[in-house]
Image: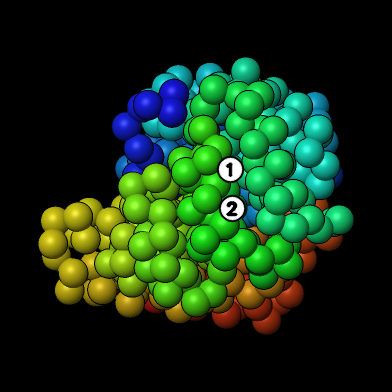
Amino acid sequence: MSPSSPALSGVYPIANTPFHPDGTVDYASQERLVDHFLEQGAHGLGLFGNASEGYTLSGPERIELMRRISSRVNGRVPLVASSGHTGTDAAVELSKELEGLGADCLMVLPPYFLKTDGDGLMFYFEAISRAVKIPIMVQDAPLMTQVAMPPALLARMGREIENVKYVKVEAPPTGTKISALARAAGDSLTLFGGLNCQFFIEEWQRGARGQMPGSDRTRDLVRIWDHLENGQVEEAWRVFGRILPLLRFELQPGLGVSAQKHNLVADGVIACAKVRHPTAELDATSLAELAFLRQLANRE
């Protein structure tokens, strides 16, 4: 999509990356997962984020995954690909590469190894913007990056950097950050929520126009979105309340990806719940807890 295309909105699950038991990428399961998202009503897909274990993928693996996913989706929904990097030049090259392989939007973390100031962040996102023609979604995730981006800075990016059109707000408390950013940015930015949708409804009520959750409850989250868009707030809360214990369980640092993969295996979508180190595996007790919460979430 071009920066002038209609704004992204809705539920954009971050696609897990399935692996074989030996740790190699399971491309067949990846394609089944893409089909599953589309069948579940996803409005778009997020690629190579934290839930994708993007931090464990090699360059050639990322290229092959992007090529296959773009071909499988074939333009039916937008693809938001993560292209942040610890170095500005590397982020520019990765962003250009993913654009060329079919990304419709880029989700970009700030540099987080050697941290920079506000002017440095402007330089970084401006360099990426000059190199591409598609929109950029700034990922505001200080729990992971330890990089604070206040509403005034993010609003400035939206006003002054041509292709910065979105912010994914993952800076708790997310509701108040979304309200502050909406006031500061006006129409220059479209806001998304993350953190596995734990404040989905409050964020929507404060102006968020999309969510980027994990992979395993897409149908329920699309139902919540549809209820909200149709003014059925109580119905949205009913669905949300049923799945909230599971969403909360999956927010445990380092364990959520394993939990999502086990749920996708249980649903017959992917073949194996293997994760790559340093992503953590669920232990036997956690697997039993997960099975119970999945059973609760599946009760209508």
Q: Residue at x 54, y 74 (%)?
A: 172
Q: Quadrant of residue 125?
A: top right
Is the residue 131 above or below the residue 276 in the image? above
Residue 74 location in percent, x, y?
45, 20
Q: Between 129 and 65, which is closer to the camera in this rendering?
A: 129
Which quarter of the rendered picture does the C terminus lie within? bottom left
Q: Amino acid at mark 2?
A: Gln
Q: Secondary structure at mark 2?
A: strand
In the rendering, at what x and y percent does residue 142 appear?
Answer: 66, 66
Give amino acid for label 1.
Answer: Met
Q: Which of the numbered marks, if any, corresponds to residue 139?
A: 2
At x 21%, y 61%, the residue is 228
Residue located at (85% from left, 56% from top): 113
Classify 10 Å Cα crowding around label 2: few (below 14), some (14-19), many (20 and above). many
- Please indicate whether residue 145 sits to the left or right of residue 15 in the image: right
Q: Which residue is mark 1?
A: 107
